Amino acid sequence: MIGFGIMSLNLESEVSYINEIARLADSCEMECFRFLPSLINPHTLQVRGKQFDPKSQQWIEGEFSIPTIIYDRCFYGDDEHSKICLPIVSWLKSRNDITFLGYGLPNKLDLYDSLKNTPLAAYLPPTQLAADANIILKELNKLKKIILKPTNGSQGFGIYSLKKNDKTFHVKTEKQKQIISRIFPNEAKLIQWLQSLISQREYLLQPFLELSNNEYQPFDIRVLLQKNNQGVWGEQGKGIRVGSPGGILSNLSAGGSVISFSDWTSSLPPTKGKYIREEIDYILSQLPRLLEEEFLPLFELGVDIGIAKNGSIWILDINSKPGRKVILETQPQLQETLFLAPLLYGKQLFLMGQSERKIFHEKTLSH
């Protein structure tokens, strides 16, 4: 049987999603494994982890060969374990006897640089590296309101909005589903705080976009794109994420809620709804192709799209390891489709044969 490995940094992460995939693996003539990159023995090429037993419907601990097909669900932080695992995953990706469903995307700034000269440039918020506190202050004085985001951030962690008032500066963020505000009385105090912030991690700077609804709740559209078993991109579903009133995040991890895309568009004037649907369709028709021309092959994308109060449409974020909560809550009938998708695409990759996978692999190395 085909070995299908799900790789993560924590065996307790995404348990329900991974369990559902494992339950369906046998029907696809695949054996399902879970493992951490740090538990691979580089000498024997064996890994300690868990194998799903379809008879008992349980995970069994054991040691096994590195699976031929790997689904990478590693979410890296600044912790020591992440730093240990990153070079191991890079080594796995360099092996021509192992194929990843998707090879991931670079940080937000590299993504912006790769798309800023494409047909999608008009949908990208102007973005620059927040390399120095004085650069940030200069942009804040010019634009009056800006956003700072970690270049390697996810789930809305570490995002700050900065607003210039007559004499003071207002900084706002969200932590543990709470809105935290701070007022700085002058430029010197703000620069001191900014310098401390950007010395800890790399940030990028963007204009603040008015992406809230009539109730002053931030909202955006999350779209899930995936390849089918023939490797053809398609939309699996989309939904609306709504944040707390006065907040800056719509992420579900920050306490956001979900409404269906069709319910939301049906509440709009017909002409506006048609315009938004057409614009989103255009973005989604272009994005996977442009990314795969520039970066390594992908399997899935979570695309966050914002609609500003002036009607402008923006690509807010692109994630190569998206969650499924928005889609499952708004379109629960897609459950089995979403759980089967990684297995069906993985099987297609395996059935290509070694020579075709080698060509596929050489394409990834050419970048």
Image (cartoon, rainbow, N blue to C red):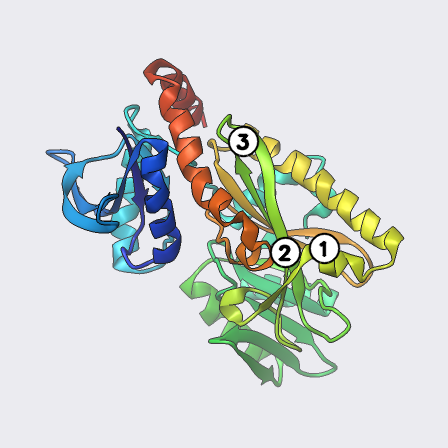
Please determine whether, in this image, residue 82 is positioned above or below residue 165: above
Q: Quadrant of the N terminus?
A: top left
Front-most of residues 176 and 208:
176
Give the quadrant of residue 42: top left
For the residue labelled by badge 1, is the local secondary structure a helix, a strand or a loop?
Answer: helix
Residue lying at 22% horizontally and 49% vertically, measured from the top left: 56
Residue lying at 56% horizontally and 58% vertically, measured from the top left: 326
Residue type, label 3: Glu
For the residue labelled by badge 3, is the local secondary structure a helix, a strand or a loop?
Answer: helix
Badge 1: few (under 14), some or many (20 or more) residues near its Cα, within 10 Å? few
Badge 3: few (under 14), some or many (20 or more) residues near its Cα, within 10 Å? few
Residue 161 in picture, x, y percent from top left:
61, 70
Q: Which residue is mark 1?
A: 262
Q: Which residue is mark 3?
A: 292
Front-most of residues 65 and 87:
65
Q: Residue furthest front?
A: 55
Q: CA gap, disc 3 to disc 1?
A: 29 Å
Badge 2: few (under 14), some or many (20 or more) residues near its Cα, within 10 Å? many
Q: Nearer the viewer, mark 1 or mark 2?
A: 1
Q: Which residue is mark 2?
A: 239
